[in-house]
Every structure is written in structure tokens, then in C-alpha cells.
Image (cartoon, grey):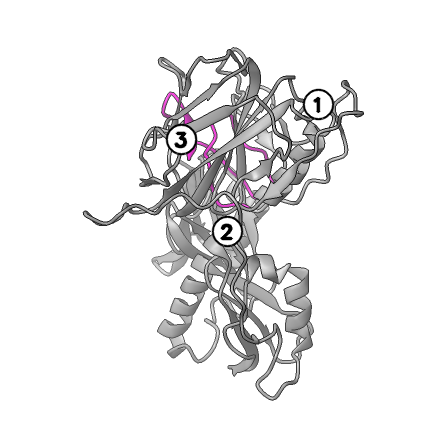
């Protein structure tokens, strides 16, 4: 989902700050926050435990008479799992049975988190008992627009009898309507919130979660996907699986073993679906991917002690270039072997987020908004020298191409041209 101030598009960047209007959610995996600050007031004698749940994110295991209910406009009872297409408007309702301070978080399919209530467009996040609040409110200066990525989203409502200090989770930058959230992934959010609520009385807080999916709605006559169960189920027993870096003869490719550990492979790569095999003058291994990460491979050239991963939309384009050039027999020459870990690029000033893959001879930039495109040589060097997707140029909107034999590239906010052998950069 994204929030648009006066229906204006939102923001992103590689290592850059986000703008006032925000997109909820987008592709992104920011670094895990280590939360250290607790509430400055309140007794810890009746400290409140918190239970981390796969579906409900964070739950108060202590019985409390405080109740909060949250729902979206396509599921008024909050028990379903409605589907929204990208670009559709979404509204959120909530109600409490006691006066409370309420905090609304959205966790998207990529694990990116946004805090959209409180915000600077609303007077307060204090909600009176029995009063239904709807966001955006009538006449609000912002909207919620579904922006992707496709997959499962969760809206968490946290109600507390006392105002909470979320400074170590989110902060409001100057002149921004929505807070910048410092954590990524619902488990990290749950851990951070468990620290925040810990000093409260055991019955002083509660939560509710509503789910919705981003993608194409079910075919006519097909029943919508039911809301996931509130408690995780025990996974079925599985047979022995291929290990990361395992060759069919039982030996190990240490570069892949190390990469799987470095990338927390169980969280980002999933299970291996093939043994390590030869590819061109190197090796690769295929993985199932995790959720919206998409299929993945670990790969490296012969003699390299370091392996890197390529995922999802980047992998799809990487292989399509290889197929077009050599029928998939080797890496595409314009890119070469992966030479660095992928990066998730947060929102820039155009409201776009995506993925960046670094290769020996070039780079791939992928977004849900435009697609996945390659850049190489002096064009790539100049682009990254300006700050890449976080600069005024934003993300590429097509592959690098030639005009009269000279390289050029088009971006959200401008173009790069080679004129008489020199790079020229133009704003739109």
C-alpha cells in the first residue's frame, strides 16, 4: 500500500532518505534494528510479556479487557483475506472498547514495514472508546493506494492504555507526514515492540491483525483465500533435503556454503532445489526462494572463493539475457558473473523502490513499476557517481541503448547521453 499526499506519488533510495509522501509497502530489506531504549516511565514490577506469533506478529498472552479491532474496506469483519490490485484505493477502520492510544503498522510481502498511524495529518493517535475511526478520514490530505509487491500483507493494530515511545522503531523527519521505520521484517518488528510494551501493566495493551493480499483477484466463482490461522501450525515432516553447497557426489562447494550462511539463506534463499552443478566456467545451485523473494541461485566463476545470490526479477532477466546470447550456456557478457550481494533499494523521491544487482561488467536494476534493466560502462559509472536511483535521475525505465552508435539511458528524472565521446546528463 502507498500513501499519497493529495494523490501524489511517493519515495525511495539506495542508501538515501525517504520523502514526505510514502509508499506502503515496497520492496525493501533494511538492516535489523537493535532496540535498546525502553519507556522512560511506568513500573516494571507488573511487566507485560509479549508472545511473537507467525501470523499475529505480537500477542499479549495475558488476558485483558482492552480490545482493538482493525479491518480494511473490503472485509468489514476483519476475518477474511481480500485481494487488492495495484493502484486500487484502500481504507482502514479501527475501534477500541476503551480509551487507548493506537498504532497501525503495515508489513508487506517483502517484510518492509510502515507506520501510518500516528501521522502528522491526524491530530492525535488517541482513540475514544466505542468510536470508529477510518483512515484516511474524510477530507484527509493523503490516500492509501495499493502499490505492491504482490503477496501477503498484514496490518497490525497495537492499542495501549499509555502513550508509547517508538523513537527506536520509527521517527518523523522534518516536513514529512509519515514516519521512517527503522526495522524490517515482522519478526524484528515484534521483537522491537516487545521491548516497548514490556514496562506496561500486563493488561495495558493488546493487538489485532488483519490480512489482505496484493495481486489479481480470484476468478469469478472462486472462493477468496481464507484468513490465515492465528497460530502457526506444525509443519509436516520432510524427507532429507539437499544442503547448500552440496554436490551430487556428496562433496561441498565451500563458497556456496559460506554465501548461504552470510545471506541467512533459510530466510532469503529457502531450500536447495538442485545440487551444485557446472555452468560455463563456473558453478551454480538453485534454491526455492522465500515468499516474495522469488526463485534464487548461488553462483560463482571457477577459482572464486566467494559466491553471490541472484533472486526473483533480477534472476529472471539475468537468465533471459543469457538465453538470448548463448542459449543459456554462460552468463550474459554485458553483465558477467555476480560480483556482489543484491541490495534492496528503499523508496526514492519518485516513490519507487526495487532491487540492485552488481555484476562483473554491469548492473541490473529491478522495480515493480518499470521492470528490470541493465546498465554498463561509462553510463553506469556516471549514474552511480550521482547517487544511482537515489539521485534526481531515479530508476532506469528501459535498458541502456545506442543512438547513432553512442550509449544512452533513460531514467525517471532524466537521461544520460554520450555526446562526442563525453557523458552528458540531462534533467527532465
* Quadrant of the drawing holding the N terminus: top left
Q: Which residue is mark 1?
A: 201
Q: Are marks 1 and 3 in contact (CB under 8 Å)?
A: no
Compared to 235, does 328 lie above or below?
A: below
Residue at 34% of width from left, 58% of height from top?
404
Residue 51, how many percent across, how many down? Answer: 64, 39
Which tag, 1 or 3, sits closer to the chain's start?
3
Residue stretch rendered in magenta on the structure: 1-28
Dominant secondary structure, magenta: loop
Looking at the picture, how far across and down is residue 350, in whole percent?
Answer: 44, 35
Residue 372 location, quadrant: bottom left
Q: Residues within 10 Å of mark 2 (few under 14, many from 20)?
A: many
Q: Is residue 26 magenta?
A: yes
Q: Quadrant of residue 169?
A: top right
Residue under numbered circle 2: 355
For mark 3, give the secondary structure: loop
Mark with earlier residue (2, 3): 3
Amino acid at each position: 500500500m502507498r500513501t499519497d499526499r493529495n494523490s501524489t506519488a511517493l519515495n525511495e533510495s539506495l542508501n538515501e532518505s525517504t520523502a514526505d509522501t510514502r509508499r506502503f509497502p515496497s520492496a525493501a530489506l533494511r538492516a535489523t534494528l537493535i532496540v535498546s531504549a525502553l519507556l522512560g516511565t511506568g513500573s516494571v514490577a507488573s511487566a507485560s510479556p509479549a508472545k511473537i506469533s507467525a501470523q499475529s506478529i505480537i500477542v499479549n498472552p495475558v488476558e485483558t479487557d482492552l480490545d482493538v479491532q482493525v479491518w480494511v474496506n473490503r472485509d468489514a469483519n476483519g476475518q477474511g483475506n481480500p485481494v487488492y490490485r495495484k493502484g486500487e484505493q484502500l481504507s482502514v477502520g479501527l475501534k477500541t472498547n476503551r480509551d487507548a492510544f493506537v498504532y497501525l503498522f503495515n508489513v508487506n510481502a517483502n517484510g518492509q514495514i510502515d507506520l501510518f498511524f500516528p501521522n502528522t495529518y491526524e491530530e492525535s493517535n488517541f482513540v475514544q472508546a466505542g468510536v470508529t475511526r477510518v483512515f484516511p478520514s474524510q477530507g484527509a490530505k493523503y490516500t492509501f493506494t495499493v502499490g505492491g509487491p504482490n503477496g501477503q500483507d498484514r496490518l497490525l493494530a497495537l492499542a495501549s492504555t499509555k502513550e508509547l515511545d517508538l523513537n527506536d522503531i520509527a521517527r518523523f523527519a522534518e516536513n514529512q507526514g509519515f514516519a521512517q521505520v527503522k526495522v524490517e521484517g515482522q519478526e524484528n518488528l515484534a521483537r522491537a515492540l516487545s521491548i516497548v510494551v514490556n514496562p506496561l501493566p500486563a493488561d495495558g495493551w493488546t493487538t489485532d491483525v488483519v490480512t489482505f493480499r496484493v495481486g489479481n483477484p480470484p476468478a469469478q466463482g472462486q472462493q477468496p483465500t481464507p484468513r490465515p490461522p492465528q497460530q502457526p501450525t506444525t509443519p509436516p515432516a520432510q524427507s532429507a533435503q539437499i544442503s547448500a553447497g552440496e554436490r551430487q557426489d556428496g562433496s561441498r562447494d565451500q563458497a556456496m556454503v559460506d554465501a548461504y550462511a552470510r545471506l541467512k539463506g533459510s530466510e532469503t534463499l529457502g531450500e536447495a532445489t538442485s545440487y551444485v552443478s557446472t555452468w560455463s566456467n563456473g558453478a551454480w545451485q538453485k534454491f526455492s526462494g522465500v515468499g516474495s523473494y522469488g526463485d534464487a541461485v548461488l553462483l560463482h566463476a571457477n577459482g572464486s572463493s566467494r559466491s553471490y545470490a541472484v533472486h526473483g526479477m533480477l534472476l529472471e532477466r539475468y537468465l533471459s539475457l543469457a538465453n538470448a546470447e548463448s542459449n543459456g550456456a554462460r552468463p550474459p557478457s554485458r553483465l558477467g558473473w555476480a560480483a556482489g550481494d543484491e541490495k534492496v533499494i528503499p523508496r526514492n523521491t519518485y516513490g519507487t523502490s526495487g532491487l540492485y544487482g552488481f555484476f562483473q561488467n554491469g548492473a541490473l536494476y529491478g522495480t515493480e513499476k518499470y521492470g528490470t534493466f541493465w546498465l554498463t560502462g561509462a553510463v553506469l559509472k556516471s549514474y552511480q557517481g550521482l547517487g544511482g536511483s537515489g539521485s534526481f535521475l531515479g530508476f532506469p525505465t528501459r535498458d541502456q541503448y545506442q543512438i547513432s552508435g553512442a550509449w544512452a539511458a533513460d531514467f525517471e528524472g532524466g537521461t544520460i547521453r554520450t555526446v562526442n565521446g563525453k557523458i552528458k546528463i540531462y534533467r527532465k
